[in-house]
Image: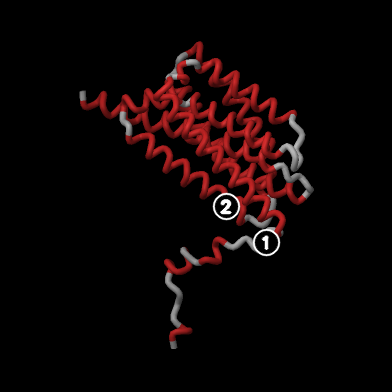
Amino acid sequence: MNSFQPRSRESELFSPAIFKFDHLEAHVQTHLKNVYSCLSIGMLSAALGAYAHFYTGLGQWYFLTALGSLGLIAWLATTRHSKETTSKRLGIFTAFTFLSGISLGPLLDLVIRIEPSIISTALAGTAVVFISFTLAALLNRNRTFLYMGGFLMSGLMWLTLMGFLNIFFGSRMIFDFYIYGILALFSAFVLYDTQLIVEKRRRGDDDFIWQSVDLFLDAIQIFRALLIILAKKEDNKKRRRD
């Protein structure tokens, strides 16, 4: 009789079948493990960089750390991918993410002055968005999200232009549109970059370190946008109370 009982919605929601990726080839699954392992190292390195800022104040030298990040990413891009250079390139990637974490220092200082708990909330939000969109991309058996590339690059160009022009206009409305646009755009980039990594591996590209850079930048931009949005909302609440 039990076999004829309807399955509950909870059992369907948490079914292990949801997390099966049988449609992905074995070599693609192995490659994804390498990508996310490398990404985890980068996230840890960025966290250490942000932590180091509070003891060294290096984040105040934002221009220099930004230049250092650009130099490292250029070095990584020009270093040939091979088994012999994997350790070297991983070291460059780790240094890049460390400097990226330091560059977050000034923003983290500002957020802590408003409300320290915002950092943990933004981290949790970033994890939820990143994991959800990653699963959506991996479980999609078609290459649907690959067609968003042109739209996403166009959107990035317009948002960059908007952010630059707002330096001169100083409009709150434009800034709000810009920061929410960044959040939405880089959330969509997680979908696109994840499927692009799968497609690249199918075509023979196994450079997991360079592909981790794309996902790292997506996650950092989502985290940064959430920090600003949450801090702005909390600051507005405090002003209303006063």
* Of residues 156 and 219, the one drawn nearer to the viewer in this rendering: 219
- Picture quadrant where residue 93 is located: top right
Q: Residue at x 42, y 43 (%)?
A: 124
Q: Seen in the image, is 122 located left or right of residue 92? A: left
Q: Position of residue 106 (x, y in %)?
A: 43, 21
Q: Residue at x 49, y 15 (%)?
A: 61
* Of residues 152 and 53, the one drawn nearer to the viewer in this rendering: 53
- Tell me if mark 2 has few (under 14), some (14-19) or many (20+) residues whose alpha carbon lies within 10 angstroms of its own: some
Q: Secondary structure at mark 1?
A: loop
On residue 23, which mark appears?
1
Question: Amino acid type of disc 1?
Answer: His
On residue 221, which mark appears?
none
Give me the C-alpha separation between circle 2 and circle 1.
Answer: 14 Å
**Which quadrant is home to the C terminus?**
top left
**Residue 34 against residue 121 in the figure, above or below:** below
Q: How is the image coloured?
A: secondary structure
Question: Amino acid type of disc 2?
Answer: Ala
Q: Residue furthest right?
A: 203
Q: Residue at x 64, y 43 (%)?
A: 192
Which of pointers 2 and 1 lies earlier in the amino acid sequence? 1
Residue position marked by numbered label 2 in the rendering: 136
